[in-house]
Amino acid sequence: MTLYIVFFIFGSMIGSFLNAVIYRLPRKINIAFPRSHCTNCKKLIYWYENIPILSYIFLRGKCSKCKSPYSAMYPAVEILIGVVAVLLIPDNLNSMSLMYYFLYFSLFCALFCHFIIDIKHQILPDSINIYIAVVLLCISFLKYSPTYYFLGALIGFLFPYLVTLAFYYLKGQQGLGGGDIKLFAALGILLGPVGIINNIFLSCFFGALFSLVMMALGKMSRNSKLAFGPFIIIVAVFQVYFPTLFRQFSSLWSI
């Protein structure tokens, strides 16, 4: 139980940091400076007002000075990342398993930031894509041959890039964004040639299905922009963290 508590606290602290990343990175604000402050009255948030989860409860979700409400997303992210930190704890704790733990945990955190940022701002920052690529390169270096992750990254970049290029020349419109293509390339490092092709087709399928449903409900038009990153990420999360479930699902279509 003590171990779970320690990892949950660790995860919630990382979640607090991710909140800053999600808010600041799309706005091109330095992640480290300035210090955390109320976005309404600019009052600095002291360390005792920035304790994950607890501070939000004690402050009743409001700034201690101007009483402006803080988003409930802050404690929600801290709780979620804390839970993920616990769920990823390996059965046998040793140096190798802990190394894999931190790599896979940091990957989830980066994918989560991408997920939220793309939904809110429809961008996938290059800095996060680079971070994901580095983490996945570390994992693949330990598990696979260079041919595996090189081909995966190459296919992950070339296939969607060429499709987007063809779409542009045929329709005069941009298909996938540059961030989406870079994310495919980064994920290909770990997923490999077959895995990244599965991801491309499934994310496109679910993205198209979502668009059709939204248009049928009158929530979107044919010209509406769709944040595609979340579909790539959802499929990737199942591929990486729930491989057995993903294989069972994929077998339905013999993917």
Image (cartoon, rainbow, N blue to C red):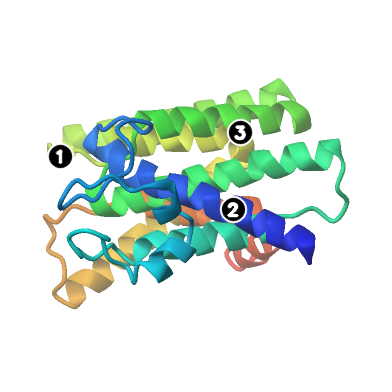
Question: According to the image, label 2 marks what residue?
Answer: 11
Alpha-carbon span between mark 1 and mark 2: 41 Å
Where residue 27 sits in the image (x, y, percent)? 22, 38
Secondary element type, mark 2? helix
Nearer mark to the viewer, of 1 and 3:
3
Image: 157 above or below 13: above
Q: Residue at x 23, y 66 (%)?
A: 69
Q: Residue flagged by tag 1: what amino acid is it?
A: Gln
Where residue 105 sits in the image (x, y, percent)? 62, 46
Q: Residue at x 72, y 26 (%)?
A: 141
Alpha-carbon span between mark 1 and mark 3: 32 Å
Question: According to the image, label 3 marks what residue?
Answer: 136
Secondary element type, mark 1? loop
Can residue 55 be seen by looking at this rendering? Answer: yes
Question: According to the image, label 1 marks what residue?
Answer: 173
- Would residue 16 be found to the left or right of residue 20 on screen? right
Q: Which mark is residue 165?
A: none
